Structure formats: structure tokens, C-alpha cells
Amino acid sequence: MSTPSEQDVAACIGKVQSTQPTLGALKILAIIKEDHPDWALSEKRFKKILSAQSSERTTLVARTGIDPSIDVASIAPKVEVKLFGKGKGKGLVARTKILKGEVLWQEEPWIATADQQLDAPLANKAMCTTCLTLFLEPSPPLSKPCPSCDSAHFCNRLCLGRAKEAAAHHDLLCPGANPSCWPLLKYIRDNGARHLAAVARIIALWRGAKASGDVKEATRIEKRVWTGMARINQLDKEKERREWSMVAETRLAELHHTHQLLLQALHPSSPDARFQKLIRKTTISEAEVDRWFSFDSYLELLGLAGINQESSGGLYALHAHLNHSCEPNLQVRNLPKTFKAPSPDQLPCDLPPPNPAGVRGTNRLTILARRDIEAGEELCIPYVNFSLPRAERRQDLREAYGFWCQCPKCVREDV
Ligand SMILES: [Zn+2]
Ligand SMILES: [Zn+2]
Ligand SMILES: [Zn+2]
């Protein structure tokens, strides 16, 4: 018998996990012992090395900061932002006791995007492009079409006006107003590329603000994107995928291709006269061109969309502050327009039932307490299906969000 070095054991763990990432600790140990029958390796020492390796895996943490433009006190009076420090970043905690069924806040997207499954109703003008409300009949009487193209339809003037605000249908991404964006829009639609859609809309929103001379708005978006929101380089994240080595070449080509489509649609030096008219021939600095249009920035923005985009579509300023837990105390819902928050005397109460068949919630988010929450408790939502076994949850979180879950449930379930 010989005592293996820590490095040898770690290398074996890495090898086993690279082919079977969801195996539990004891199964990994069994495989290693089978491969190295001469090793004297106690279960205790093995687990120590394994856990050191798992905590090493937490180094791929998204960069994050504080978004000064969100007025948390007025949006969600019972909630405050907290910086947890190294490795964890920011999160939200309860300021006072919150009761089950209570609505903590409601929030409209600052960037609205739609899921691929909504392409059909959107194309058929059966749904509002801004708030994603399903019309009871196609093109209802008060509804408004986009004045420049045939691909967007809105509940009313209000939603038409808001389209530009949340970039749900920005001029720079309207195929009528800016025909150069057509290949990008087609790619997004054909591939259900929702993260790419979010990136395009973020850039369009910022570029639009610059073009209209709205310095305050341009700065707000700039700060939110580059210092406020959690961000991770898309390539760093994708390298975590089990099958990365097999797909790397194709995926890189795809990323370069979509970056080109984005440049064709929105690049400041686009030769398209209609695009130049939309940006009022305004120019941006070289540093800004680099910050918003380089390939590296594209990877950062895609990563930002990937970790912040809500499952029903869209980016939400305050919601993006919520951390993950496999036993969440909050529920995030897209409820129908008719939903009314319970009044204080109705609390605590059950959560609203699932939306009835045929009734679609809007893209306004409602954040509810899943149970009673004490003051000071961190507020958490599930980023992945939390009924999956721990190994699968952790792997899903690692691949999609770049972190290794150490929530109380994951720690408790430690073998
Ligand atoms: Zn349009
Ligand atoms: Zn609407
Ligand atoms: Zn967990």
C-alpha cells in the first residue's frame, strides 16, 4: 500500500467527474479505489480533498456591483440590498418580518424579450410586443401597430410608447426603420436566441439614448450594465459544459457569426443611410465603440443576459439582485393583469394558484413570499429546478450560472 499525494487524488477526482459529473462522493471513492487498489486512502482524507476541490470550483464567480439607479426603498420597502463580500457578491435581505403570500414587489422589465414559444402569437399580432398580453381577438380595436414595420403590435398607445423604453421594439431593431437588423432578427427568431436578443436590445437602448442626447439615460444604462449587474464571460462559462471539448469549434464559429450580425445591425460605422439617420449621425468615442462592440464585450454581455434573464423573458433591475437557493423563500410569478395583491389583513395566505389555461401572465414580475420570512433573512429564488437531486442541481447551476451551490440544502445533503 502507498499513500497517494493530494494532487494524485485530486487528479483522479477530476478525471471521474469529467465523465460522470453527477456521482456522489462515495461512488467516486469506490471508482478511485478500484483503479488504484494499492492506495491507502481513508474516506476522511478523500472527502477533505474532494471538498477542497469543490470550494476551488467556486472561483468562477460573476463580477457584480451596486446599481445606484434603483430606488429599492420605494419599489420594495421591506427589502434591502446587502453586499455579502468575497465569493458571493450582492443579494437582498428582509428588513422586517414578511408573511406567507405577501407581495414583496412588482416589477416591469427594463429590457423586455420574449420566449421562442411566443413567436407565433407575436407574428400573428395576437399579443402585445411590449407587455406580452395575449389579445382576446387579433388586432383589437384600440391596439396600435408599429408605424414603421409589420412585425410589432401593441395593446394601446401606452404600450407603444413603452416599447422604446424597455427596448421591446426599439427603432434601431425595427426591421422597417433599420433594415440592416433583419438578418439579426431572423437569426434570433430561427434559433430562439433569447440571450442574443437581450444583448441587441441593451445595446439599442444605450445607443438610442446616446443618439437622442439623453446623457442621463445613457449613463444609467452604462452603469447598470458594466458595474451594477452580475456578469460573467460567456466563453468562461461555456467551458464548464461537460461536452465543451466536442462543441468548442462550432460554438466559437457561431459566436463570431452572431457577433457579426449584431455589428451589421448596430455598429456605429454602419454604412446604411437609414441607420445613420436613426442615430442622427451622432458619433461615439473609440472607448465606447470598444466597450459595447468588441467581441470580448459581446461575450460579457451574453454572459450577463444568460445569468440575469428571467425564464419568461426580460431583464429586471431589482429581481436580478436575488441569489439562488435550492430551498427558496420567494416565488416569482408572471400573473395575469387582473391579479390583486392580498391586503395586510388577508395575510398570511396561500400563493396564487397557477394561471388558468388560456390566460397568460404579462411580463410584469410579482415577487411573493413562499413562507413567513424573518427580518434579516436573505431572500432567495430558485435558478434551476430545485426538486432535482443535488448533483444535478449543482451541475446545472455550474453550467448556466458559473457557481457551485453551497446553499443550506446542498450542504445538509452532503454525503
Ligand atoms: Zn417596427
Ligand atoms: Zn401591452
Ligand atoms: Zn443548493
Image: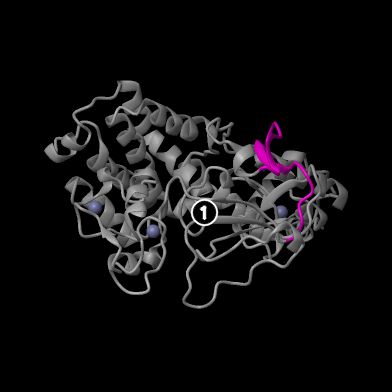
Indicate the secondary structure of the residue bearing disc 1. Answer: loop
Asked if residue 187 lies left or right of residue 49, the reply is left
The residue stretch that appears in magenta: 77-100
In the rendered image, residue 363, in percent from the top left (x then y), is placed at 47, 58
Q: Is residue 143 above or below residue 41?
A: below
Identify which amino acid the numbered label 1 is placed on.
Glu
Q: Residue 244 colored magenta?
A: no
Asked if residue 267 lies left or right of residue 407, the reply is left
Ligand 3's image quarter is bottom right
In the rendered image, residue 42, in percent from the top left (x then y), is placed at 87, 50
Q: Which residue in the protein does label 1 denote?
A: 310
Tell me if I can see residue 16 in this picture: no
Using the rendered view, name the quadrant where residue 214 is placed.
top left
Residue at the (27%, 53%) spot, across then down: 185
Q: Is residue 118 above or below residue 147?
A: below
Q: Quadrant of the C terminus?
A: bottom right
Asked if residue 370 lies left or right of residue 231, the reply is right
In the displayed orientation, state which residue is furthest to the bottom: 357
